[in-house]
Amino acid sequence: MSLDKATVAHIARLARIRVSDAEQDSLAGELNQIMTWIEQLDEVDTAGVEPMVSIGAVKLPMRDDVVTDGNYPEKVLANAPEGRDGFFTVPKVVE
Amino acid sequence: MANLTNLTLAAARDGLKAKTFSATELTQAHVKAMEQTRSLNAYITETPELALKQAAASDARIAKGEAGALEGLPLGIKDLFCTEGVRTTAASKILSNFVPQYESTISAKLLAAGAVTVGKTNLDEFAMGSSNMTSHFGAVENPWRRAGDNRPLVPGGSSGGSAAAVAARSCLGATGTDTGGSIRQPAAFCGIVGIKPTYGRCSRWGVVAFASSLDQAGPFARTVRDCAILLREMSGFDPKDSTSANVPVPDFEAMLTGDIRGMKIGIPKEYRMDGMSAEIDALWQKGIDMLKAAGADIVDISLPHTKYALPCYYILAPAEASSNLARYDGVRYGVREPGNSIEELYENSRAAGFGKEVRRRILIGTYVLSAGYYDAYYRKAQRVRALIARDFEQAFQKVDAILTPTAPSAAFAMGEKSDDPIAMYLNDVFTVTTNLAGLPGISVPAGLSSDGLPLGLQLIGKTFDEGNLLRVADVLEKQAAFTATPDLGGRA
């Protein structure tokens, strides 16, 4: 499978990273080289093998569903690029 | 009070206890070394004032007889661990202004044990790299140079700053993280010891995430004993990390008995790769002979899926990274680039904030997770991962630990391999398998290359068997008797 410029534009859009037209060309080349190398996995017979999703405990631990943290909005907002009145601010979303 | 920076962490601990010197004197010596080796760029943020304040508090606790296990010992903290009130960047532009309001579990545990923190060490951006060349804050220089050659070398990566700082003696030990080899490869390149513990041994809470099913923190130090001391303090169950393991933490230092008689050490034939340098091969043989001389039994084993570990990793790690790094959106923290819509704000912030390698990996991860490719790539890689883990399970029915080289070469020069991502990825060929299988691995300096650079050997252990792994590593270290140190010459 060849990863073309249009595909790069599509995945860049999905990843929410602006990629210029010129960069799309060079990235297509680089990503293709990497994906071609990765495709050696096709040699491995994985029929009947369960995908391994994590290491260790299959069952994650549960805890009581109670509030254990919070109540410090000033800390939550301390690193916000822009904020007002205890909220994060962003460009107008709804017209 | 000469050479306080040449002490091992264990010797410094004992010296403080015996009141031969104070924590303030020990810290001052390391702060001075940090200043003198600043040209290495091992630290993104130096915190000398904080360190001296911590040292004074340590001296007060020592005077009262309330010293902790790491009381007064100067450490470096990889700038991937969130530190309350101290900027934490992950070596990325996008976090270049981020000041955490909380402390990572591991750094909090080290501080609670009395450690002094001299600074935040440099790394590859978001821990993605094997050379420390992808840091937004500039490359780190390896304290070592080839004999008769002045070209600066890389310290390895991603924890290159931590490894360089420990080798340059500006701290007694440092924290690292290892997703595909990011503790062990830099340890080998800088002639020091580094251990990646079993997945789940150390809490990931407060550590900037790269690939959550592979990331694991661990210590760097100049001896196996020092790593054992640090690992005990870093380990333990944390309710804030649901993947941290609720298993007892032994006194690793007490397990360094020096006796490995009768232990079975596996030698995997698949790690003898085409094109491997004769020097690395000879070092490996030397390691086999040393363990044999110490009374271990050498057993030939097979790990048949070894060659597929790297391509498997380069699906899974970018996939997890693309999800983890979705949080950097220019809204809640980090760098914001303006845009006319919120979509534009996201796209502009992420384009401006992420470096080339990080962007490349996010795009690969997005691609392998995208509709139509998920099964062909991501599911396939998870199945191959299961086979790699099974290879180890079968091998560990026959052996107690496995010996391999740590990296396929010694440290390379800055700029080498930079234009070929796959050549760079191959640095992790011997280390990445243990991340996929969740096993502990340690790199021990075992010899010098013909041009005078340190070379490391890796030992791989069973799940949660760091005690025995460290025991073998301690014997290997003693047998190898690696005493060479970098010549900092005009750079210090």
Image (spheres, coloured by chain):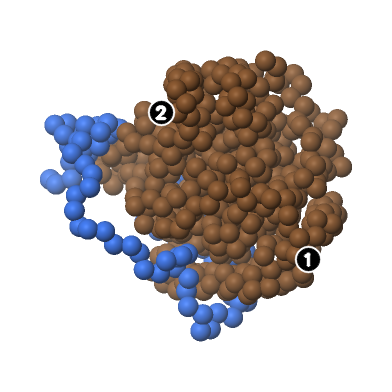
Chain colours: A blue, B brown
Of label 1 and label 2, which has the lower sequence position?
A: 2
Regarding residue B310, the answer to whether it shows in the image is no
The answer to whether dots 1 and 2 both sit on one chain is yes
- Which amino acid, mark 2? Val
Q: Locate residue B329, reporting x and y percent.
A: 33, 44
Classify mark 1: residues with Cα within 10 Å, few (<14), some (14-19) or many (20+).
Answer: some
- Which amino acid, mark 1? Asp
Residue behind mark 2: B86
Residue behind mark 1: B297
Which one is in front, B236 or B338? B236
Please determine whether, in this image, residue B373 is positioned above or below residue B144. below
Task: Work out which quarter of the rendered image holds the C terminus of chain B and state it.
Answer: top right
Regarding residue A66, the answer to whether it shows in the image is yes
Q: Element under label 1?
A: strand
Q: Which residue is outermost to the front?
A: B65
| In the displayed structure image, the side of residue A42 where residue B361 appears, left or right | left
